Structures are given as structure tokens and as C-alpha cells.
Image (cartoon, helix red, strand yellow):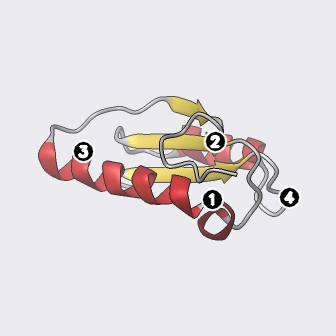
Amino acid sequence: ISVPVLILAGEEDKSAPLDGCKRMHEEMGTSEKRLQMMQGVGHWHCLEAFNEVTPLIRDRIRSHLDGPACSWPIQHITRSSHPGRRPG
């Protein structure tokens, strides 16, 4: 893979477990990759946490278009701490 990659992994995802996502992230050949673990989210990221997913994808695209290539680490996010978190 020679393009930037963003993997969104739900902490509670039973269809695509986090360990498999971590392995896929480690094995990807691109240097511009990021694994984003989303706490309290299952397999349907865009439905369960759309207010969190949208800024992650938007920011990923912006960073690719606006800046030099970077190597992203594995990052964890909590539903209560993300700026896109919907109240309630």
C-alpha cells in the first residue's frame, strides 16, 4: 500500500476485533498510517459515533492535503473527550 491509511477500530467491535486491526496496521507497508481506536464503539462507527468519525476523516484528509507526509502512531480516543462528541 502506497497511500495514506486511516483505520478506525471500535473497542467493542466483534466483527473486526482490535487485535486484527492492530496486526493489519503493523503489516501495512505505507509510512503514513494511523490506527484510531474508538472506545465504546462497535462495528458501525459511522452510525454509532458519526460526530466522532467525521472530524477524524476530515482532519486526515486535510493533513494529507496541507502538510508533508507523516508517520502516525496508534492513538486511543474516548467518546467523552473527543471534540466531536455529541452531548448526552
Q: Nearer the viewer, mark 2 or mark 1?
A: 1
Q: CA distance from mark 1 to mark 3?
A: 21 Å
Specify the farthest residue to the front: 88
- Which residue carries the number 4 mark? 14
Q: Is residue 45 at least partly visible in the picture?
A: yes
Density class for disc 4 (Cα within 10 Å; few <14, some 14-19, many ≥20) is: few
Q: Which mark is residue 37?
A: 2
Residue 73 point in image, percent of width and height: 47, 29
- Which residue carries the number 1 mark? 49
In what element is the residue under mark 3? helix
Given contact means CB atoms under 8 Å apart, are the residues at marks 4 and 3 in contact? Answer: no
Q: CA distance from mark 2 to mark 3?
A: 19 Å
Q: CA distance from mark 2 to mark 1?
A: 12 Å
Q: Amino acid at mark 4?
A: Lys
In what element is the residue under mark 4? loop
Instruction: Decide: is 76 above or below 10.
Output: above
Q: Which mark is residue 11?
A: none
Q: Residue at x 74, y 53 (%)?
A: 41
